[in-house]
Image: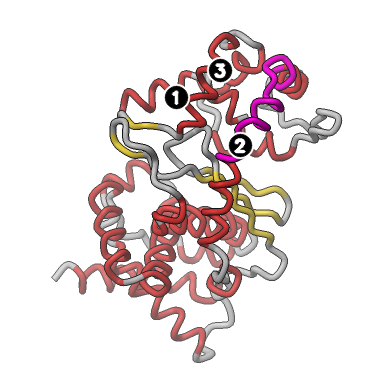
Amino acid sequence: MSAVFALSSVIDEAHAQRPHSAHAHARATRKRLAGFKEHPAVTSLETLIQETAPIDAIFGYALRLNTTNWTMEHSPRWAPPEWDQQLRDFQEITGLAQWWASEDAAWETSLSQARHMFTHLDLRQFLAPFVDTSDAKFTLLPNILYPAEHEIGVRVGNEFTCIVPPRPAWGDSPPWPFDEDPVHIYRAAIGQYIRLMMQDYLAHNQAQVDEASLIELPVSDSLREQSPNWTDQFLALFVSGVVAIFLEDRINPAEAKAYTLMESKVYGMAMLPGVVSVLRRYLGDKEAGKYGSFADFLPIFPKQLRVAKRIYSL
């Protein structure tokens, strides 16, 4: 799927908006495949892009595809007809298997770098106070192909997958190695895992969501415009808050401060310090036995956040 994306309009548009250098393997793959832009697998993807289909859903399709016999059981209604067979033909006609074999060293290097960053990290233990992680399987795929600008989060059953490219560099500079940029890979992984798990958690605790949503969240105008729905606003605040706590506790306070500043300036997260304060209070109270789960705390979250806004606005 990343190879098919290499021939899509998304890549040209992303580079036009923010000139950057993709991984050398990505550039070489795009050059190798340049003559296949009109292949049905690519034109089907282009149709989905024009219809603004979520990229997460597109890669979810790829993860659900049985590549032993190239079939998709219970293909989603939005998927192009016979896309599974088009993808199979694309892989065969372009000689992708042989190309990947010749480029294996680049993938192995990225895998080794990413694995190194998670060797002594217990994500299950860190996320457990917020969601039930007992049956969750966390998978991280370092992606040196495309998209090269942002990570992708996909859930298939109990497996939560984060597909993350290296951080792009400006101009012709090479992207950062995964093990030299801990904030990038941790932000991506923690953010996607907790987002996917909390979405499911909220769906299973609708009564608490309904109670909490009676109180408007104190979000910026830009965030409100981007996410008019209460649940989407909550998820944006919550995910950023959890990532900030992780960076402060597991990396260092300076990195957490830099992340908070960037989120405030670029994504309208001026309330992020208040979110962190509220979530830390929850963690302390839960450890003291005041709350049995995050669902117990959820109706209180917007009330405490409004108080925190007054404090951090002084």
2 or 1: mark nearer the eye? 1
Q: Quadrant of residue 208?
A: bottom right
Question: Element under label 1?
Answer: helix
In the rendered structure, the answer to whether residue 311 lies left or right of residue 200 reads left
Question: Callout 1: few (<14), some (14-19), or many (20+) C-alpha neighbours within 10 Å?
Answer: some
Q: How many angstroms separate mark 3 from mark 1 (CA)?
A: 15 Å
> In the rendered image, which residue does mark 3 sit on?
32
Q: Position of residue 32 (x, y in %)?
A: 56, 17
2 or 3: mark nearer the eye? 3
Q: How many angstroms separate mark 2 from mark 1 (CA)?
A: 18 Å
Q: Quadrant of the C terminus?
A: bottom left
Amino acid bearing label 2:
Ala
Q: What residue is drawn where x is 53% and y is 83%? A: 291
Amino acid bearing label 3:
Arg
Q: Position of residue 43 (x, y in %)?
A: 60, 13
Of residues 71 and 280, the one drawn nearer to the viewer in this rendering: 71
> In the rendered image, which residue does mark 2 sit on?
57
Q: How many angstroms separate mark 2 from mark 3 (CA)?
A: 26 Å
> In the rendered image, which residue does mark 1 sit on?
11
